Image (cartoon, rainbow, N blue to C red):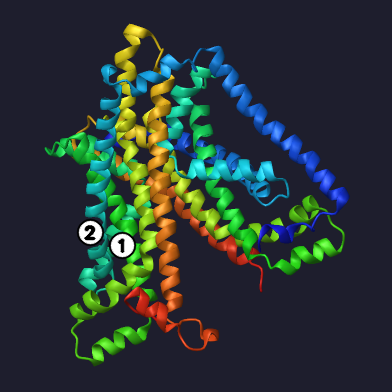
Amino acid sequence: MSAPVLFDVPGPRAKARIRLWTAVGALLVLAVVAVVLWRLAGNGQLEGQRWSVLFDPNSGVPQALWDGLLSTLKVAALGMVLATALGLLLAVGRLSDHRWVRLPVSAVVEFFRAVPLLVVIFTLFFFLPGFGIRLSAYQALVGGLTLYNMAVLAEIFRAGILSIDRGQREAAYALGLRKTQVMTSVLLPQAVRRMLPVLIAQLVVLLKDSSLGFIIGYFELLRQARSLVEFFTPRFGSEYTFQLYVAAGLVYVLLNVLLSQLARYVERRTRRNTRAGGKAPDAGVPDVASVVDDGRAAPL
Amino acid sequence: MDFLADNASLLWRAFLTTLSLSLLAGLLALVLGTLLAAFRVSPIPPLRGAATFYVELLRNTPLTVVFFFIIFGLPQIDLIMPFFPGAVAAVALYTAAFVCEAIRSGINTVPPGQAEAARALGMTFPQTLGQVVLPQAVRAAIPPLGNVWIAMVKNTSIAAGFAVTELTASMQRLSNAQADQLVLVLLAVVVGYCVITVPSAWVVHRLERKVAVLR
């Protein structure tokens, strides 16, 4: 149900009412923005010189923030690769015919899905030294992100594999493929393709969670901003504090918006491909042109 | 086991902090999220725009950044929050965006005929939404809302990084213990979270079956 169903096409009086409320609503929104700006200006936070430090290479600020961004991306990228690889393995393991594989894998997946990510990271960072294993903040962060997200991704992949039509598997067996071959060359490629939007959405979550490095003292974007603030404070007071925080926060938001857009784009693409495969029965003949155009037939 | 007994009061208080943080933030997020969802389907463009902007912004911001702004950023505009209320605010503001999406997906499951019938009876937008659509939408939204709630309980752990001594922070406090005791601490913390999430999942499941709308 789309929004307009909820209210009538407005007549003249309703239009006047809506105009009135539009004005009130706009005023409210503007008032909130104005109060924030007024408070900021009152504290001198909007002065150009305070913001220009973010772009002034002589201050070392852009370099430090850039380093922070790179550290964030490094952790996130490594975590993404490891979590995806391990998630695939776990998904396949959980669907295994052998109980001695299935049960422990299920236990691992359920455990890491139930535990908050920060608990995993803290365990690696604060508890493992008690067993003589000392991890750096970087390793603990990558480890935590990997362990937690591999469990989530495993469930995503498993749902994808289970959603593939039985006929695919049966046909593959009928052709004489072995179990491994059926999984790797028939089921997994289709499952991954089908689950791509969800997969990317989860990878966005992983990128967001890499900000937890702030808490264990890994110098990612937020921690970098905080340390810059701590560096500036003795000399300039809290002159640049707010600006640095806003900059770090904005970079995160931009990064995630970009990735979310990518997810949306991929989702639209995959949806179109499915339709092109002739899934819609009312289309009569499948649209051959678009199938050929895509270069590959979509899963049926 | 002695070790756990010695620190039982710390762990118990930490558990209560996590529980109260979750309950308060959950309640706030539910109210705020419902309001946002109502804004998002309302006929008034600025409200729609503001709610959409809020949801998109908060959904794309890491919770740590939200915490960061509330604890370190707000003092810059002379709004100083103590740590616990700050944590409640951060978790609630963040979760409200997800609650809004869950309820909106619930609204989408209500057949258009319901709203059309309400309008045919001459109901205004607030009446249509409040008396006809939302009651049905919330029922359909119970499973996603349950997921949001459980994810939120796990997200409260981030308050550990901002001077709130909840379950996860207690791990940091007790990290100097012997290796075999560390396993116990970890177990206690995990059990603490499961005590909240597992019954919640069960309640959500029961609720879902009880109030499900047959279509």
Tell me what residue is drawn at x 50 percent, y 36 percent: B21
Residue A245's x, y, as percent? 40, 25
Q: Residues within 10 Å of mark 2 (few under 14, many from 20)?
A: some
Marks 2/1: CA–CA distance:
8 Å
Residue B56's x, y, as percent? 51, 45
Q: Which image quarter: residue A290?
A: bottom left
Tell me what residue is drawn at x 65 percent, y 46 percent: B48
Q: Secondary structure at mark 1?
A: helix
- On screen, A171 above or below A190? below
For the N terminus of chain A, the quadrant is bottom right
Find disc 2 in the rendering and name its residue. Answer: A86
- On screen, B11 above or below A154? above
Q: Are marks 2 and 1 in contact (CB under 8 Å)?
A: yes
Instruction: Indicate the amino acid at tag 2.
Output: Leu
Instruction: Indicate the amino acid at tag 1.
Output: Ala
The earlier-in-sequence mark between 2 and 1 is: 2
Q: Which image quarter: residue A222?
A: top left
Q: Secondary structure at mark 2?
A: helix
Residue B156's x, y, as percent? 44, 39
Find disc 1 in the rendering and name its residue. Answer: A154
